[in-house]
Each structure stands twice: as C-alpha cells, then as structure tokens.
Image (spheres, rainbow, N blue to C red):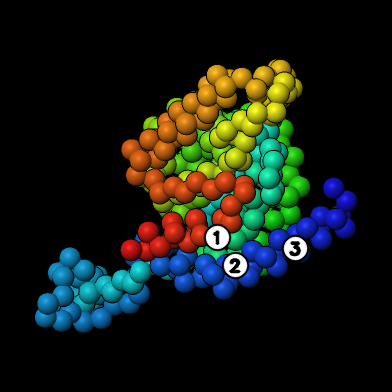
Amino acid sequence: METSELLKKVRQIEIKTRGLSKNVFAGQYHSAFKGRGMAFSEVREYQYGDDIRDIDWNVTARQNSPHIKIFEEEREMTVMLLVDVSGSREFGTVNMTKQEMITEIAATMAFSAIQNNDKIGVIFFSDRIEKYIPPQKGKKHVLAIISELINFQPVERGTDINKVLQYITNAQKKRCTAFLISDFIDAGDFQSALTIANKKHDMVAVQIYDPREKELPDVGLVKMRDAESEEEIWVDTSSKRTREIYNKWWLESSQKSFEMFNKSRVDTVSISTDEDFVPALLNMFKKRGN
C-alpha cells in the first residue's frame, strides 16, 4: 500500500475509533477493566481495628511504635491485543472484511486504553507468532499500531490459537487484560492453553465472522478457495444437503469454541461483519462492570 493511502486510512480509522473510545466506551471501559493489583502507597501509625498482617515490622522497630503499610488499587493496567492475521481474515461479503472490522475494534480498544492511562501492546499471530509490539502509552504508539493493523503482511496463512495463548502466558510476566480477536476457525483444541492463560491474565475473546460463513446462499455451482490452505474446490450451493452440511459445520465449530470459553470462564462476544460492533462491545463491558 502506498504511504499516502496508508496515512489516509490510518487517519480515517483514528477519527472514528478515537471518537468512539472517548464518547461511547470511556466510562464502560473504566468500570469493566479495573486494576486488579494493589500497589504500596504509604506507611502510617497503627490504629485500632487495622489488620495486624499489614504491620511494617522494619518501620515499627525503627520508630518504636507500630506502623502499617497502606495499599491502594493499582489503576494502571497493561492491555494486550492478540490479533489473528491468518488468511481467513481477508474474507468479507457484506459491509467490510473481517480484517477491516478487527482493525476498527482493536483501534477502539487501543484508544480506550490510553485514555484510561493504560499501556497497550499487540501480538499478531497466524499458526506462528508473527509480530510482538511491546506495551506503551501515547497517541503516537496507537497510530503505529493502527498502521500495522492495516498493512501488516504475515509470513504464514494458517491459525494456531494454542501458540498465541502459550506465548502470552510465558512472555507477558505482569498480569494484563488480553483481548483475543479472531474468527476462531481453528481445528485444534486450545482449552488447556486458554485455561492456563486466563489464570495468569484476564482473557476476553472477541469472535469476528462473516454472515456467509454461517450460511451459504443458493447461487448454483461456485468455485471456492480455502483462504488458509489455498485449496480450491467446486461447490454446488443449489444443493440443500450441501447448505445444511455447511451450516452444521459452522454451528458445531462455533459451539466448540464457546464451550472452551465457558469452561475456562473467559468472557466472550461474537460480532458479524454486517453488524455495528458498538452495541455488542458495550453489552459485554456492562456485564463485566456489574
């Protein structure tokens, strides 16, 4: 993509998603993703009713009177976006491709994070870890992320969710809130890796899908190409049986993923490319904030 065209697209997405994060998501994001840790604040003299487990024995010895440590909620968080860049992200038949929707959602999350004084980082993955962008603050950092979301070209086209889950568990030492953004078209079982990742971090799953992945239209004989394996086959979409088998595959695949999310106690939201993603995300934020 030409530099001028890329800058134009970055600007368009910035205008839309920055406005959403500031005017729509600001309060909901703050309440849904509160700081999970406790940071040391100060030491003061012991008062009746204080928890003796908070006594600072070193200060107590020096002052010759009991003192306790005061802690406060650690507000600053680290937010990681785990972004699926496999071949299937290129698919789109209605308003936009899955990649375009992923870009807008990720950008909205990124602006929401920096407005909440949180750090934001990204891991691009296919069936390997394609790129790691360390967490930082600031508008310049978010604009660089948006540029990568638009223009990044992965080495591989497959999907391995296990890999990215294992990576964030091992590589991200400090607890973070991690948004796993994918269509979850992955034949593998990532239940164990998801459970382990969610014990260490606060995982949230965001499924992006196209309506045509859910149901085939009756348009006769069609040549189809697998976006990840690049295998091509002819499909007779006029066959009711074919359309039923296709729909059954979609339902079983989606059910498998959501069962893994439920077992691992991971919050999830599913969004179609022909929908406005704002209501779905707001609803998920509200549930988490309750």
The residue that mark 3 highlights is: 12
Judging depth in this view, the residue of 151 and 70 nearest the camera is: 151
Horizontal placement of 234 versus 35: left or right?
right
Picture quarter containing residue 114?
bottom right
Which residue is depicted at the point 70% across and 28% down?
A: 219
Q: Secondary structure at mark 3?
A: helix
Q: Are marks 1 and 2 in contact (CB under 8 Å)?
A: yes
Horizontal placement of 93 versus 59: left or right?
right
Query: Disc 3 or 2, which lies upstream in sequence?
Result: 3
Q: Secondary structure at mark 1?
A: helix
Residue 43 visible in the current orientation: yes
Q: Which mark is residue 278?
A: 1
Q: Could you say where residue 205 lies in the image, as x and y percent from the top left?
A: 47, 46
Which residue is depicted at the point 57% across and 46% down?
A: 272
Q: Secondary structure at mark 2?
A: helix
Judging depth in this view, the residue of 19 and 247 nearest the camera is: 247
The answer to whether 84 is drawn above or below residue 81 in the figure is: above
Which residue is depicted at the point 49% across and 26% down?
A: 248
The residue that mark 2 highlights is: 20
Q: Could you say where residue 232 lies in the image, as x and y percent from the top left?
A: 72, 19
Horizontal placement of 173 versus 61: left or right?
right
Q: Are marks 3 and 2 in contact (CB under 8 Å)?
A: no
Residue 39 visible in the current orientation: no
Q: Are marks 1 and 3 in contact (CB under 8 Å)?
A: no
